[in-house]
Image (cartoon, rainbow, N blue to C red):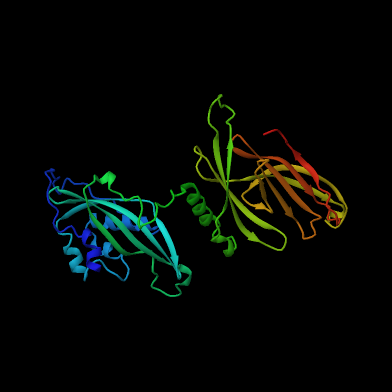
């Protein structure tokens, strides 16, 4: 059974179909791809290795279940193959007992050494074992469990299966969401509480008219991704990303005034004498934040101590594709009461 699963990748008898082959010295070398960051990337890496005739590398993308009885047989199966092009489709996945299994629709176009081409299509199943439960080496990366490809009469560009399995095609991959998640993990993976790292962000869609829009122009859309990062005794920190068709995914930065705060006897336990803005700065952190979908505002509220009698709070309004600071309040009194003073007031209509 195992030999049958991988028989389509051996290409033992590719029949020429009248195409003229390039001389070996004229044929461009296939690009080197060695990427285990996702299931479809592993499949593309496999065929990069096969096209480059790096069969030891190709063999290494499989797990314990190998595509042939031994490595020599695997290599011999590609005696007549010059190169292989590959296309991958929408990946579906399913979790099971510490692993994630991925199903990848695949189409390939194999060219033999005389220039003949054949197209095959089908599915690969790959497995990713949870890295956190792998306590000792060797590490087991995403690897191929099995594959079943059959000859296709369709053109290579049309041969890719819409999905794997009996169910409907998986939903279209949310590229912006995946980019935001990768950016968040890359930047804050070692700074945020582990309990939040696996959580999905809260996603908001903001539709608006561009300031230069003409009557009848469609709405534009910006998407906002809210990631929880850490939780302490009285403050919770979040990170926001936003995306649109022009700027791509980018982290939201929050403008904040830099304050010169003066106390009697230069002691915060003394009487508050005054506050002055001496400049502005930006921060990627949003403390005790909330997004109001109706008002299109993000608010922050940073307690300086648990009783909340000293704090700073910002209001950021979405307008024409960006969030801007419109109000900032500071309570520097430490007097047991909440009595903030507005130090920035740029309130305008959206």
Image quarter of residue 234? bottom right
Residue 35 visible, this orientation = no
Quarter in which the N terminus is drawn: bottom left
Q: Which residue, as the protein is rendered here, is positioned at the far bottom? A: 136
Q: Residue at x 75, y 46 (%)?
A: 259
In the picture, measured across the screen, residue 236 lies left or right of residue 29, that is right
Q: Which residue is drawn at 52% across and 40% down?
A: 244
Residue 38 visible, this orientation = yes
In the picture, measured across the screen, residue 66 lies left or right of residue 173, that is left
Rendered position, 132 above or below 264: below
In-front residue for pair 163/36: 163
Quarter in which the C terminus is drawn: top right
Rendered position, 61 above or below 343: below
Query: Residue 157 in the image: x percent, y percent?
Result: 28, 44
Image quarter of residue 323? top right
Query: Residue 329 in the image: x percent, y percent?
Result: 77, 45
Query: Residue 281 in the image: x percent, y percent?
Result: 66, 45
In-front residue for pair 150/291: 150
Image quarter of residue 342? top right
Query: Residue 163 in the image: x percent, y percent?
Result: 36, 53
Q: Which residue, as the protein is rendered here, is positioned at the far top? A: 215
């Amino acid at each position: 059974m195992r030999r049958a699963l991988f028989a389509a990748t051996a290409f033992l008898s590719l029949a020429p179909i009248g195409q003229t082959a390039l001389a070996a010295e004229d044929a461009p070398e296939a690009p080197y791809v060695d990427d285990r960051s996702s299931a479809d990337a592993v499949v593309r890496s496999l065929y990069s290795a096969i096209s480059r005739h790096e069969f030891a590398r190709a063999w290494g993308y499989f797990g314990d279940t190998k595509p042939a009885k031994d490595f020599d047989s695997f290599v011999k199966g590609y005696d007549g193959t010059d190169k292989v092009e590959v296309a991958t489709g929408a990946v579906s996945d399913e979790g099971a007992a510490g692993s994630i299994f991925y199903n990848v629709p695949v189409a390939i176009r194999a060219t033999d050494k005389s220039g003949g081409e054949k197209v095959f299509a089908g599915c690969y199943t790959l497995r990713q074992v949870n890295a956190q439960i792998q306590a000792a080496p060797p590490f087991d990366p995403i690897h191929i469990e099995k594959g079943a490809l059959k000859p296709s009469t369709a053109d290579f560009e049309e041969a890719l299966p819409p999905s794997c399995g009996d169910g409907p095609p998986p939903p279209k991959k949310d590229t912006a969401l995946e980019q935001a998640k990768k950016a968040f993990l890359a930047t804050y993976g070692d700074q945020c509480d582990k309990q939040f790292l696996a959580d999905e962000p809260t996603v908001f869609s903001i539709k608006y008219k561009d300031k230069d829009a003409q009557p009848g122009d469609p709405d534009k859309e910006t998407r906002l991704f809210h990631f929880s990062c850490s939780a302490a005794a009285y403050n919770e920190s979040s990170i926001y990303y936003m995306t649109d068709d022009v700027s791509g995914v980018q982290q939201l930065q929050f403008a904040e005034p830099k304050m010169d705060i003066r106390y009697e006897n230069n002691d915060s336990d003394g009487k508050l004498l005054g506050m002055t803005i001496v400049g502005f700065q930006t921060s990627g952190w949003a403390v005790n934040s909330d997004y109001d979908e109706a008002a299109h505002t993000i608010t922050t509220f940073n307690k300086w101590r648990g009783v909340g009698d000293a704090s700073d709070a910002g209001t950021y309004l979405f307008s024409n594709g960006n969030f801007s600071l419109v109000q900032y309040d500071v309570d520097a009194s430490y007097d047991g009461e909440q009595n903030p003073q507005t130090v920035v007031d740029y309130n305008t209509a959206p």
